[in-house]
């Protein structure tokens, strides 16, 4: 009888999985870990200036933490769409904050909005329209599901042009088109005004375009009175997704929700079937913990106000500091904790330095002596040669900064600058490193030109 160890068993991976690349954020995390284990310089010990990871730095609100502790004994499976207390709280939350009158039976709870968007793309037939630049998670999902898709490049203002949307949609043969609308927007930090959403809606109604409105950053809108949900403008054709991760700093809780369009009764049944097949239900203790996070309370209102004000202060500083560097442009954030920095003015110098893609730029900035992590344009569904990058300005101790803000709210411009310098030194130093990098790049290009000129003189 042959030993079991004498057989060489080969496991075959499905080609569909083979074709999928690791998500850019995880790829970057792996690269950073490898870089720090290999770096011989003592300066590597501090870590790096982290502009790459989009995670709210603040503590999870106390009432959510306490509710989780209180409900650790909830071991039974929850209903597939979510527990009734949570769906009811989300319904009231949407009416209070977003002016959307949505009944609980139109709300489905899932393990994060990322999964829910994936589930929606599974059940919705049609071609996906993906505006670019885009959050780095959409395209891998679209490709994994083998959906037909078309990019919709935005113009200089980095927002969807209704005219461009219409031109693209008219070319598509599918009866149904699916537009992914991320508002407020990752990676630019921009916000769509009500009139802009109405113009997009006119095109969607005319050409039968379904919208998946990813509104995970809604509560981070700096002037919250300016946020308008697409679910309010286009209720019959919009799936709205939102959750705990960004507004409640609870990404690790993995809890999101989707609001279905009006009259989508048959679709809800199909969706329930998918959820039950894939993951049965979201963790029951987590659902109970989320309830007070979606309930209307003075505590949550204070939390939202303080965190969005801090994001605004950090965003204004980052925008002003980056655009003060010669040649660098950036989007001016109105929400989120991101902006899109444009380094394309340095394209000739980058090319001379053999930095031929945004990915190569990211790799160059992370190594010694710069130690600065950014997300390059090719990860944001831009051209590989587009030297743009997402800058996430959250590399600070959120608990400490939250406390300091409550102790003394900075009001004047000078107080806000001092607040950032005192409480977010890695944000300040990271921007300085970006400036140092481009100054050296420019100096090297000038030096090379001088050497060439001297060489020509000698030759002549």
Image: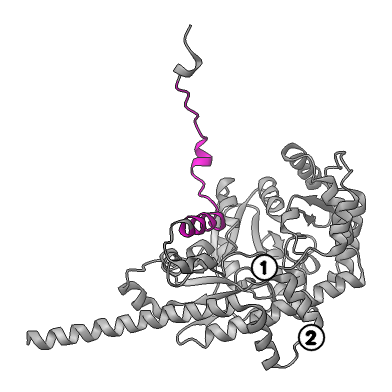
Residue 35 magenta-highlighted: yes
Residue 198 sits above or below residue 66 on the image: below
Name the residue beneath numbered marker 2. Answer: 408
Q: SS class of the residue under badge 1? A: helix
The foreground one among 151 and 162 is 151
Q: Quadrant of residue 280?
A: top right
Q: Is residue 102 visible?
A: no
In x, y percent, where is residue 246?
72, 65
Between disc 1 and disc 2, the foreground one is 2
Crowd class of label 1 (few under 14; some 14 to 19; many from 20; radius 10 Å) = some
- Say left or right for 286 vs 347: right
Residue at image location 76% in from the left, 42% down from the top: 275
- Say left or right for 10 vs 130: left
The image quadrant where one finds the C terminus is bottom left
Residue at image location 65% in from the left, 70% down from the top: 185
Residue 62 sits above or below residue 269 on the image: below
Q: Earlier in the sequence, mark 1 or mark 2?
A: 1
In x, y percent, where is residue 76?
87, 38
Q: SS class of the residue under badge 2? A: loop
The foreground one among 18 and 47 is 47
The foreground one among 125 and 23 is 23
The chosen color scheme is: one colour
Residue 112 magenta-highlighted: no
Name the residue beneath numbered marker 1. Answer: 203
């Amino acid at each position: 009888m042959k030993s079991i160890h004498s057989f060489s068993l080969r496991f075959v991976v499905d080609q569909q999985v083979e074709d999928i690349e690791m998500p850019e954020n995880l790829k970057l995390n792996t690269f950073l870990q490898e870089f720090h284990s290999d770096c011989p310089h003592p300066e590597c010990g501090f870590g790096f200036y982290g502009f790459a990871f989009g995670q709210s730095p603040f503590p999870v609100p106390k009432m959510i933490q306490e509710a989780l502790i209180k409900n650790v004994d909830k071991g039974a499976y929850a209903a597939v769409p979510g527990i009734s207390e949570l769906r009811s709280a989300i319904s009231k939350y949407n009416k209070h904050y977003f002016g959307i009158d949505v009944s609980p039976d139109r709300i489905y709870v899932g393990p994060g909005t990322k999964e829910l968007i994936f589930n929606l793309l599974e059940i919705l037939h049609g071609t996906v329209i993906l505006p670019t630049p885009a959050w780095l998670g959409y395209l891998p999902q679209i490709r994994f599901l083998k959906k037909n898709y078309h990019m919709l490049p935005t113009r200089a203002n980095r927002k969807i042009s209704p005219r461009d949307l219409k031109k693209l949609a008219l070319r598509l043969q599918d009866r149904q088109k699916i537009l992914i609308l991320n508002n407020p927007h990752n990676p630019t930090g921009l916000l769509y005004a009500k009139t802009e959403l109405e113009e997009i809606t006119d095109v969607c109604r005319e050409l039968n375009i379904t919208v998946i409105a990813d509104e995970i950053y809604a509560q981070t809108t700096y002037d919250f009175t300016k946020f308008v949900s697409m679910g309010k403008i286009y209720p019959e054709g919009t799936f709205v997704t939102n959750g705990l991760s960004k507004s409640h700093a609870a990404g690790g809780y993995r809890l999101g929700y989707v609001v279905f369009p009006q009259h989508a009764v048959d679709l809800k049944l199909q969706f329930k079937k998918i959820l039950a097949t894939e993951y049965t239900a979201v963790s029951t203790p987590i659902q109970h913990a989320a309830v007070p996070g979606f309930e209307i309370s003075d505590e949550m209102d204070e939390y939202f106000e303080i965190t969005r004000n801090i994001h605004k202060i950090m965003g204004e500083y980052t925008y002003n500091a980056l655009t003060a560097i010669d040649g660098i442009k950036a989007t001016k954030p109105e929400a989120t904790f991101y902006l899109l920095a444009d380094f394309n003015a340095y394209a000739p110098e980058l090319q001379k330095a053999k930095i031929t893609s945004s990915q190569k730029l990211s790799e160059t900035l992370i190594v010694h002596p710069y130690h600065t992590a950014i997300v390059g344009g090719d990860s944001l569904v831009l051209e590989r040669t587009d030297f743009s990058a997402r800058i996430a300005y959250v590399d600070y101790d959120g608990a400490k900064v939250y406390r300091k803000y409550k102790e003394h709210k900075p009001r004047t411009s000078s107080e806000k600058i001092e607040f950032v310098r005192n409480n977010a030194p890695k944000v300040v130093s990271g921007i300085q490193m970006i400036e140092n990098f481009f100054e050296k790049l420019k100096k090297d290009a000038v030096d090379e030109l001088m050497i060439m000129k001297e060489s020509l003189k000698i030759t002549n």
